[in-house]
């Protein structure tokens, strides 16, 4: 099978123009088929503050009321997505900006209320991805760029970008050997979040569960790790969590960052 790179870029990098420019340059230089998923949580929080919309997160997931849904639809589906697409076009990469609603790319259901009401947040089930169209686009050398938005019942839903990256990787594994790379601003998953050099090079599930029990992971790394294990468990060939500036190395043989295994 041919290889596909599914690459997720996080909000801390998106919020730093120089780091973003380097990342997009490196991304556009990848010769093999590729898909980009972007976050933008930091930017939505900043613009929300300017508009008087407060941001609330529980375990790395945003509580999304009606005003917040409008905010994230504008920021993720509009501003961030279109800026990335325009930058990639300048770099000669034929990017196509998408949300889950466009061409019914990713269907979801509104997260049921259990202990916490997350509001307009989407959960994605198996077989909810329009893989045939995605495959066709990749064969045409088009580069899909996904915003972290899905849809259900005529409404947009806010969906964690790490989840979208994981679900797309699983869905495309029937056509490709997928390498899923989560790119963020740290060198990898850290043993101690206050020691930036304490990168865990190899994180098998058992060690992850031990460290989780010791509260080594908080905030945004939690959905990243959960989605990384969901992907590897469901048959994605390779899953890496690493620094955005290491993207070129991480598409080769000798990788940096944290390798996720079962
Ligand atoms: N053990 C850990 N290793 C790495 N990051 C951690 C760890 N524990 C908590 N974090 C936090 O998780 C953040 C990454 O999550 P998030 O900000 O959602 O990433 P993204 O840039 O992909 O949006 C890191 O910036 C860091 O502050
Ligand atoms: C439901 C939920 O949490 N959605 C995320 C989507 C954006 C995202 O995932 O952005 P980063 O990758 O930059 O964190 C949010 O609104 O923050």
Image: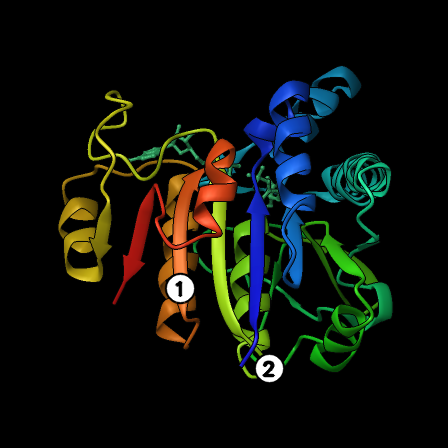
Observer able to see residue 225: yes
Residue 180 rendering spot, x and y as whole percentages: 49, 59
Q: Residue at x 71, y 71 (%)?
A: 107
Q: Provide the residue designation for mark 1.
A: 238
Choose between 160 and 70: the one closer to the eye: 160
Give the answer, above or below, for where 137 lies relative to 14.
below
Give the answer, above or below, for where 162 lies relative to 48.
below
Q: Provide the residue designation for mark 2.
A: 175
Q: Residue at x 85, y 40 (%)?
A: 82
Indicate the colouring scheme.
rainbow
Residue 79 rendering spot, x and y as whole percentages: 83, 34
Choose between 250 and 79: the one closer to the eye: 250
Q: Residue at x 41, y 71 (%)?
A: 237
Crowd band around label 2 with a 10 angstrom C-alpha radius: few (<14), some (14–19), many (20+): some
Choose between 179 and 63: the one closer to the eye: 179
Q: Quadrant of the C terminus?
A: bottom left
Badge 1 or badge 2: first in the primary sequence: 2
């Amino acid at each position: 099978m041919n290889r596909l790179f599914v690459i997720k870029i996080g909000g801390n990098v998106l919020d730093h123009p120089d780091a973003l420019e380097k990342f997009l340059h490196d991304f556009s230089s990848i010769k093999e088929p590729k898909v980009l998923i972007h976050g933008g949580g930091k930017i939505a929080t900043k613009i929300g503050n300017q508009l008087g919309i407060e941001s609330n997160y529980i375990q790395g997931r945003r509580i999304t009321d009606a005003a917040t849904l409008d905010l994230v639809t504008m920021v993720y589906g509009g501003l961030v997505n279109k800026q990335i697409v325009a930058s990639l076009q300048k770099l000669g990469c034929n990017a196509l900006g998408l949300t889950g609603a466009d061409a019914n790319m990713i269907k979801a259901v509104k997260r049921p209320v259990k202990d916490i009401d997350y509001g307009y947040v989407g959960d994605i089930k198996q077989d909810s991805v329009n893989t045939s169209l995605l495959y066709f686009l990749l064969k045409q050398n088009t580069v899909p760029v996904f915003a972290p938005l899905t849809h259900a019942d005529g409404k947009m839903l806010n969906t964690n970008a790490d989840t979208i990256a994981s679900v797309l990787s699983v869905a495309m594994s029937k056509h490709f050997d997928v390498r899923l790379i989560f790119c963020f601003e740290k060198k990898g998953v850290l043993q101690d979040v206050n020691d930036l050099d304490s990168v865990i090079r190899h994180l098998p599930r058992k060690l992850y569960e031990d460290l989780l029990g010791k509260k080594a992971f908080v905030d945004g790394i939690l959905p990243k790790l959960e989605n990384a294990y969901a992907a590897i468990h469901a048959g994605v060939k390779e899953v890496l969590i690493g620094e955005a500036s290491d993207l070129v190395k991480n598409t080769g043989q000798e990788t940096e960052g944290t390798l996720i295994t079962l």
